Image (cartoon, rainbow, N blue to C red):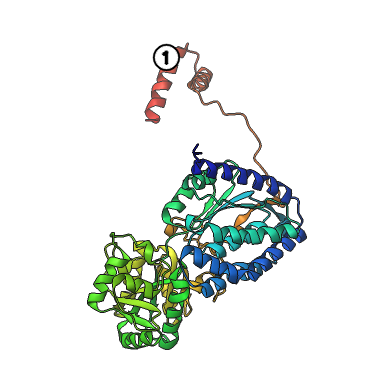
Amino acid sequence: MVQLVDNDLLALQQMRLAVQTAKEAQEKFMGYSQQQVDKIVKAVADAAFEQSGRLAQLAVDETGMGVAAHKKIKNEVGSRDVYESIKDMKTVGVIKEDHMNKVVEIAAPFGVVAAIIPTTNPTSTAFFKTLISLKTRNSIVVSPHPYAVECTHEALKVCDAAAVAAGAPEGLIQCLTLASMEATQQLMSHKDVNLIIATGGSALVKAAYSSGKPAYGVGPGNVPVYIERSAKIEKAVKDIVDSKSFDYGTICATEQAIVVDKHVVDLVTRELKKNGAYILSDEEKKIMEGVISPVPGKVNPKVVGKSPQFIAKMAGISLPEGTRLIVGMETKVGKDVPFSLEKLSPIFAMYVVDGVKHSKEVCLDLLNLGGRGHSLALHTEIDAVAREFAMEMPVSRILVNTMSSIGAVGGTTGLMPSFTLGCGTFGGNITSDNVTAKHLLNIKRMAYGTKEVQLPKHSEPVESSNDQLVSNVMNNVSASTNSNIDPALVQNLVSEIVKQLTK
């Protein structure tokens, strides 16, 4: 007899049990002190950091994307750097007291956090979301990408074991190992889920926002990088190539198009080649366009996170040894222009512009195509130019003279380390911040009275009817004459006069 198993039903059952378990554990966790919470968070961060290399290799083996050595760095940022950025944050009880204004701020957790994990950065994102959830006394239910279930689950097992060993209630960290879109959608709308952190494709983020739950989402990052003529060209190009080739371009803040001033294009081209860039011929570029985007407006998922050699082989193009990325010269921007799309791979478009004004036009076109609200990078020695871009471009992060991919997530800048980069209302998100622990707290405010307010005393409404007006007129007439006055006549006259006055 053949036993039929409905995987979707099993996934739904697993999800419901995971939420219930996480809810019960979180109710216990609410009673923990700041000291207890901090001990648990440190233990999880240390364990995650220690396993960064092993889990990086697991992620590459399972997803077929990226570079293990680079994913190890991302895991280290998602564990150590995230921990360092939140370790001193008060997240339990009274977190701030304003003695002058007599306002006390008290932290309260959200409850159960539903975390959606992408295939491009699975283990590092799992570490990050777990740490910020535990720091704020929330529990977490993780829904991995179907192509990254095993490595994500393994990362969370490391976190869970460390948390429990440090005194956390069992069940705080849950992972859905049965991949199902239906289970993920129902997770986001589950009555006991209090917050969603959605990192993934646009459709998934929209589903999170449509769930009826509070949600932090992200947006696509079609990041342009402008090389202004005053830039230190050698450093700028090295940063750009290093950034673009990092983990084969899988970070959403990675540069997607180089916008270079015409006065330095020859220098930039020379440095690109020196740093391992291969610039396609017109014929090769035409072939590569079909590989990048077989369907207009859609990037081929087979190129995401792949090596330049793998992608070139798909196009039948031979690359020199040591090639780190592929560059195609471009003049147009649009859904039907493959090189202008967000490619999440070591493939660059390069535009030549005439001055700052022209560069802003091209950058804006690229952002409007598919990167509004995310990030923009530029290399310049003129701070006024950087500030001009910052003032005018519809982005949440402007990275100056640094690698955009690592800088946007806080690796080479003073930004908060984060793997959930908000795009603000530019990109349809609720925040433009690098999401971190502070975004997972309810802040209660206890306010004492500090000033007295004198309210006007209550008084009876003033009668202003026609009857009162007639009565006043009758009294005045009676006082000045002995004649008999017809009250009805007076009322009619007064009514007519009032009508005329109030027209």
Question: Nearest the camera: 499 or 84?
Answer: 84
Circle 1: is it few (<14), some (14-19), or many (20+) Cα within 10 Å?
few
x%, y% of residue 68?
52, 72
Which residue corresponds to mark 1? 489
Residue 452, image x, y percentages: 71, 48
Please say if 81 is above or below 448. below
- Quadrant of residue 14 within the rendered picture: top right
The residue depicted at 75 percent of the width and 50 percent of the height is 31
Quadrant in the picture for residue 284: bottom left
Q: Residue at x 43, y 68 (%)?
A: 305
Viewer-proximal residue, 251 or 211?
251
Q: Position of residue 499 (x, y in %)?
A: 39, 26
Q: Nearer the viewer, residue 485 or 398?
A: 398
Position of 148 with respect to 26 (left or right) is: left
Q: Is residue 391 above or below residue 136?
A: below
Q: Quadrant of the C terminus?
A: top left
Left or right placement of residue 29 versus residue 320 in this view: right
Expressed as whole percent of the image width and height from the top left, the position of residue 226 reads 38, 77
Residue 412 position (above or below residue 63): below
The total number of labels drawn is 1
Question: Which residue corresponds to the image point at 44% horizontal and 17% vertical from the top-left?
Answer: 490
Q: Residue furthest left?
A: 283
Residue 302 seen from this side: yes
Check disc 1 and give the amino acid type: Leu
Classify mark 1: helix, strand or loop.
helix
- Residue drawn 35% across and 74% down? 348
| Whether residue 30 can be seen here | no
